Amino acid sequence: MAQVKLHQHRKKRLETGHPWIFQSEVMEIAGEVEPGDIVEVTNHKGHFLAKGYINPSSQMIVRILSYDPQETIDYSFFLRRIRQAAEFRTRFVDNPRACRVIYGEADFLPGLIVDRYEDILVVQILSLGMEMRREWIRDALVEVFAPTGIYLRNDVPVRELEGLTQSKEVMYGKCPREVTIEENGLKYVVDIVEGQKTGFFYDQRENRAAIAPLMKGWGEAHGITMHEVDVDGEKMLIPVDRRGKIVKNPFWDGAEVLECFTHTGSFTLNACKHGAKKVTALDISELAIETARRNVALNGFLHRVDFVTANAFDYLRESVEAKRSWDVVILDPPAFAKSRGAVKGACRGYKDINLHGMKLVRPGGFLVTASCSYHMSPELFLETIQEAAVDAKKILRLIEWRGAGKDHPQISGAEEAHYLKFAIFEVRDRK
């Protein structure tokens, strides 16, 4: 087995758990190697550190698979790792039949992503080393999960950095284009062929559920009070509006919510489930709005949701000018910073939507905001929101601060996995 020796004065990232070796860290390669081969990684003195697969044409030259010098990288290795990943989800995820079952480096299988949609698995193979072992991966997935079908979503540009082509195809069995799943007690239709990424974003599962406490307790703010009346000799409390009329809407105590970048309607569905009175779901994509509408109808909430196809930046700004307001505003945009060079522009984008979003929140209401841009650090994200609050003349009180869900575990020492930032703020006026 060839050896990859690392420089003496490199940063000790590997020793802290980081699973990648970059070209700049390599002092020399001892022995003949072919792209995809398993190699040993040593320090400058030749002491064993780890083993992984190599791609000499990639800046990420080695991805680590094992820290055990005696472990053989064969079919049994993949079967063992995939089974461990499945057991982890069974322990920590409320519905392990609908979650990310393999999360690359965090499951010690770098370059491999697998999402489960009931009896269908959707796979992304992102590296040459994994591509060369796809039959082992397929067979191990079949043995562990017994799916009816496995679909490959290898239509991602990052594969080209590894010298691989993009493609979409059935890997095993039969795969319908759409699958119905359940998350947080809600049903979704997932398009595994044309949906974004692998079809659905599982990483916000717990965050979507976290909005539950925001959805009730708004009756008084909406001018509704409880009056005691006598009904057939029994005293009862009934809701009455400012005009003294009885409120017949069963969700009279629920929040009025605006969700921007709704995509599949996931936050909207969770809002409705937990008692929202009315939700405005917005997305620039007509396909996304149609998907959200289908999911809302599937769960029986269609009468409580208004759908808007529009640019969120424009809609937020126009709503501020029109003096509109909501009890809760939810902002879950796509990544604004896909590279380090895009961070400055991303900060402007995040500041703009959060500034106008918090202006639309009624005093004492809540701003729910997220960023999935890895290059936007948690500190920078919070700093950007605070700058928006100053300009909007608002005072924010942080209620929740979260990352990705339990099916997206994080390896210590690998900051790249800490991409998702999610916050809930109470918004108050600063006069």
Image (cartoon, helix red, strand yellow):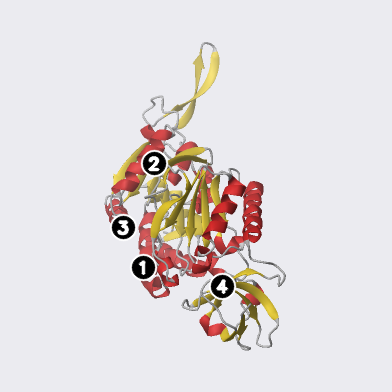
Instruction: Compare residues 193 and 79 and report the one nearer the observer.
Output: 79
Look at label 2 and name its amino acid: Val
Secondary structure at numbered mark 3: helix
The spot of residue 29 in percent (x, y) is: 58, 84
The spot of residue 68 in percent (x, y) is: 71, 70
Residue at image location 72% in from the left, 70% down from the top = 70
Residue at image location 42% in from the left, 62% down from the top = 389
Q: Which residue is identified by label 2?
A: 279
Which label sits on residue 313?
3
User: What's the CA distance linking mark 4 and mark 1?
Assistant: 44 Å
Callout 1 touching callout 3 (CB < 8 Å): no
Look at label 3 and name its amino acid: Phe
The spot of residue 297 in percent (x, y) is: 39, 34
User: What's the CA distance linking mark 3 and mark 4?
Assistant: 48 Å
User: What's the CA distance linking mark 2 and mark 1?
Assistant: 27 Å
Mark 1, Cα crowd under 10 Å, few <14 / some 14-19 / many 20+, is some
Q: Which residue is identified by label 4?
A: 37
Which quadrant holds the N terminus?
bottom right
Q: Earlier in the sequence, mark 2 or mark 3?
A: 2
